[in-house]
Amino acid sequence: MTAIVYLEPEDWRNKRAIGYDMLSEPIRRAAMLRAEQTREPSLSGRVTLLQETNENQQAGTLMYLPVLKPDGSTAAFVYAAFRMNDLISQVTKSQAPHTAGNVALRIYDGPIARPDAILFEGHNDATSATRPRREPKYEHSLTLPVAGAVWSLAFTSTSEFEDSVSYGRTVFIAVVGSLLSGLIASIVGSIAHAQVRNAAAAEAFAREAETRRCAEEASGLANRELIHRAKNTIAVVSALASQTARHSSSLSGFMDDFRTRLSALARIQDMLRPDANRATELADLVEAVLKPYTTDVEAKLSVRGGAVPVPQNEAMVMSLVLNELATNATKYGAWSVPGGRVALDWSVDRDAVPPNLKVSWEESGGPDVAPPTRRGFGSSVLTFVIERSMNGRLVTQFARSGIRHQFLVPWPGL
């Protein structure tokens, strides 16, 4: 199925054609398949355009050019529709005005001049209702290949021409040649214009395909992140329960401490609610995100950095980064064993354009670290969020004493 999706200008005639499947009609389908095979402009045979009404109905043709995907397959077609009377009349007026009244032109679809295949019929006093029928003195016929189709052209002299010259045939051939040159020039121009439109459509399609690919990638990542975050939340709650129980001397003490830490998790969502009038400080965000991961914040986490306002969008993605770093530290890194520590530092570079925020996350005292043999989901999330969502740069070092992440991101509002 190849339905018409876009059509300019957006007038009432063209709106009638939107949604029509052009492959469903044999003449159109033949031209489209030829264009797909040759990768060249392809002109259809004689059709009645969908834009036609019962008033001043004209024969029409369609020129197609395929829009290709990067792999070379056809993604869509760009096409131009021609009302033949309008087209050829305009061509003769602009390209060969001196032929008006001297030469009558008929154009037929195909190599044979059949009455039912007329595409265009100009002035011809041999068939005029106001004059007696006459046979022209001079005639000339030829076939013209046009973008994969074949037209038969029949030129005849008019009575005005015959009355005005005494050495008619030579002049007639010159006039016919002039008209034919103008016609060919116009056709070549139409083909060139179709190619320009095809190039523009291909570029637009490529942009749309890239936008769609990025959107699908982001959507897929968001879905995986949703599942991953749910699992992480369960793991965090389990770790909170285990650590709280280990340091609680009574059931009531356990309940109070556990409820406090769960409330801290909920406060993160309150900080990130969509309220444009609220500004979050980076230190407050760090505390809200990381406090639930440790039973003794001062012993397991050191934080150093100046005041940095966090816009709403950056707050959401930064909380995702901090949550991922803390989850990995809790599962596999420094916070997975007693005595492990994390040092979190940040600084700003206001002289950069745009200003930059530099963040360092360094773990120590945990299990020995070795470079991973494969890239896990956590690393993919960090890379995607920092480098794609925040347009930053992430560097990870796998020192034996502990993993170290450093990232630099543009930071608005500094």
Image (cartoon, helix red, strand yellow):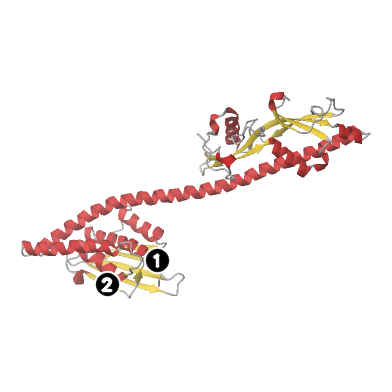
Amino acid on which the number 1 mark rests in the picture: Val
Which residue is label 1 attached to?
A: 409
Considering only vertical position in the picture, is 249 above or below 46? below
Going 33% across and 75% down the picture, which residue do you hit? Answer: 307
Q: Which residue is mark 2?
A: 303
Q: Is residue 190 left or right of residue 210?
A: right
In three-dimensional space, the C-alpha distance between marks 1 and 2, rounded to whole angstroms, equals 19 Å
Q: Are marks 1 and 2 in contact (CB under 8 Å)?
A: no
Q: Earlier in the sequence, mark 1 or mark 2?
A: 2
- In the image shown, does 239 or 58 lie closer to the viewer? 58
| Mark 2 Cα-neighbour bin, 10 Å: few <14, some 14–19, many ≥20 | some
Amino acid beneath label 2:
Val
Which residue lies most toward the left here? 250
Q: Residue furthest right?
A: 166
Residue 277, by quadrant, is bottom left
Say which element carries label 1. strand
What residue is shown at x 25% (from left), y 59% (from top)?
327
- The answer to which quarter of the image holds residue 89 is top right
Q: Nearer the viewer, residue 408 or 350?
A: 350
Image quarter in which the C terminus is found: bottom left
Q: Can you give x and y, in whole percent of width and height, for residue 270 in the image?
A: 26, 63
346 vs 135: above or below? below
Residue 88 in sight: yes
Q: Secondary structure at mark 2?
A: strand
Position in image of residue 350 (x %, y %): 42, 74
Q: x and y percent of residue 354 in the render? A: 45, 69
